[in-house]
Amino acid sequence: CSQPYVRSEEIEPQLAAKIKQVTITKEVGELIKEMLKNGFVEEQSFRDTSIGNLNRQLGQIQARLDNLLNLRIDGEITPDLYQEKFNDLEKEKSSILEKVNAHQNANSKWFEQADQFLNIASEADKLFLGAKPETKAEILSFVCSNLVLKDRLVDCDYKIPFSYLVNLDQASHLAPQC
């Protein structure tokens, strides 16, 4: 490593400045919450439609399983054919149940991530400045990737969605002022 030693007192203000770039105002936070609510309504509609379609498919598979059992009981199909068709339908049923679970889990993950983003973005600079080193490291790892020190200067790539906040802030400085 050819970089000279740099004291933490020199790096911390630079890190704080990086975090400040992703801190949002209360007004922006409210705007994002409103957008999230609208997105959540669309997500709910998509999820409910998808789960409804999957449940209809489950109903059709169950009807086919019932019909298959009746054919076997009546002796119209062999035990081997019954077992083969039964296994196929059970695989299909399991696949659909996995899709239903995936829709339900994605919904809760989406909300948790959005909530965590808003909590950090609205208080990032305050959280960072008053935090212990371990907490600062957590905040940095949540917000940044590829954190580097070169020529005594800190640089990083912002993770999505924090990169949007930085780009939004930079674009607002380029916009003509009214």
Image (cartoon, grey):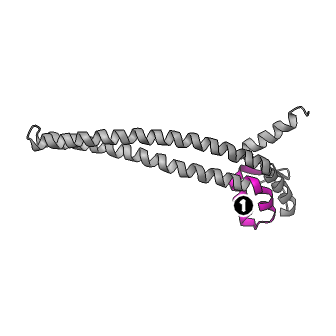
Image quadrant containing the C terminus: top right
Decide which of 37, 128 is in the foreground and name it: 37
* Residue on which disc 1 sits: 137
Magenta segment main secondary structure: helix
Q: Amino acid at mark 1?
A: Ala
Q: Is residue 23 among the parts visible in the rendering? A: no
Residue at 29% across / 40% down in the picture?
61
Q: Is residue 68 left or right of residue 48?
A: left
Q: Residue at x 84, y 53 (%)?
A: 17
Q: Nearer the viewer, residue 59 or 100?
A: 59
Residue 142 at what x, y percent from top left? 68, 54
x 86%, y 57%: residue: 13
For the N terminus, the quadrant is: bottom right
Which residues lie in the magenta part? 121-148
* Quarter of the image where one finds residue 135: bottom right
Residue at the extreme right: 178
Please tell me whether residue 160 belongs to the stretch shown in magenta.
Answer: no
Task: Say above or below: 111 vs 138.
Answer: above
Helix, strand or loop at mark 1: helix
Magenta residue check for 143? yes
**Residue 165, image x and y in percent?**
76, 44
Q: Residue furthest bottom?
A: 132
Crowding at dot 1, Cα within 10 Å, few <14 / some 14-19 / many 20+, comes out as few
Above-or-below relation of 146 to 11: above
The extreme left residue here reads 75
